Image (cartoon, rainbow, N blue to C red):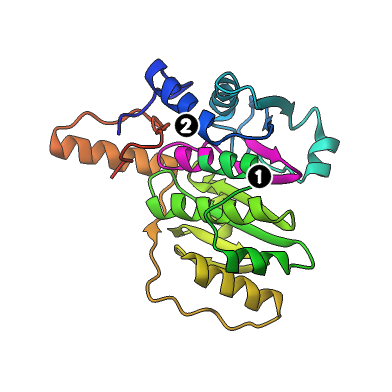
Amino acid sequence: MPAAPAGPLDRQTEQEVMRYLAERLATPVGLDVWTRPESALVLTDRDPCTHCAQTLATMRQLVRLHQALSVTAYDLERHASRAAAAGVEMAPTTIVRSRGHAVHVVGLCAGVLFPALLDLIGFLSQGATPLTDASREALGALQAPLRLELQVAPYDGYSAHLMRLTGALAAESRLVRLRITEVGEFPLLAARRGVTEVPLLTIEGRRFAGAWEEPALIEQIGRIVAGNEAPVIRDHVYTMPFFTEEEAQRLAAEQATATGATPAAPHSGLYVPGRDGPR
């Protein structure tokens, strides 16, 4: 799959995304993009907003591709009280809103995460997802908010799969409070959280590594809601090693040197649906 430039989408990709959105958007979707100006000082207590400008530029371009999309830009420092009320702590953060549902997406969704982001937007707009009736019934039985936090990486297909699955849960139930973080661009956060593999899903404070299939995830959620501490036994727990963005770029450059290929530009992957993703 060809990659779009490190900023806004190129003309060919733009046309393909436009067609994709035209097929999937039904009701308005708001994109609240929170960024933070870079400090001249080197801060050791937080990660810099490496992709703030790129994230905002990408979302603004998406808005031009479909009339149902709108974007509002916020400064995390200038609008600190509003950020606190919205639960925004890191930049860049994009809150995807539609039909009273909202998902927080922290970081730049590049690589295989970009088409997953488009699917998430479509799920929220349509209010329709590929979930089974049994899963919808289980979500309909929720009596209190369910907090999910997903940590993903742009090189990992399992991350994209779980981003779609948890996004579908949030689109089906307003009680599902989902935060998705592209953790590779936040090395300080990754170190504090002890992230060594992706995807990493936290359900009401319970941490689970690896991908999930829908029935097993719904069962695990049901157990946690019921106060059952027993983990669901999965036949396979598929994960990928975690690399920071800098480490991933270095490994890609080393691999390109070894094979004689041209190394990809940093975070070059804004991949579109319908094509093969990076291997």
- The verdict on residue 104 being magenta is yes
Residue 206 on image: x %, y % = 62, 70
Residue for badge 1:
104
Using the image as rendered, state which of residue 186 and residue 240 is in the foreground: 240
Res. 49 in view: yes
The mark total stands at 2
- The image quadrant of residue 120 is top right
Residue 57 position, x and y percent, is 56, 21
Q: Secondary structure at mark 2?
A: helix
- In the displayed structure, does residue 92 sit left or right of residue 83? left
User: From what the image shows, is residue 200 above or below residue 182?
Assistant: below
User: Whole-percent x and y of residue 139?
Assistant: 67, 65
Give the distance between the C-alpha atoms of the residues marked 1 and 2, in whole angstroms: 22 Å
* In the image: residue 190, left or right of residue 13: right
Tell me residue 224's x, y (percent).
Answer: 66, 75
Residue 13 is tagged as none
22 vs 93: above or below: above
Q: Please give the residue where the numbered disc 2 appears in the rendered image.
A: 20
Measuring 73% from the left and 69% from the top, which residue is drawn there? 141
**Apparent side of residue 44 relative to residue 116 in the rendered image (left or right):** right
Residue 91 seen in render:
no
Please give left or right for residue 83 compared with residue 206 in the image.
right
Q: Determine which quarter of the picture holds residue 221.
A: bottom right
Q: In this orientation, which residue lies closer to the viewer: 56 or 35?
A: 56
Helix, strand or loop for disc 1: strand
Residue contact at pointers 1 and 2, CB within 8 angstroms: no
Q: What is the three-letter code of the residue carrying label 1? A: His
At horizontal 55% and vertical 59% (from top left) the residue drawn is 131
Which residue is found at the position 64% from the left and 39% from the top?
Answer: 125
Which sits earlier in the primary sequence, circle 1 or circle 2?
Answer: 2
Please provide the residue range marked out in magenta.
Answer: 92-118
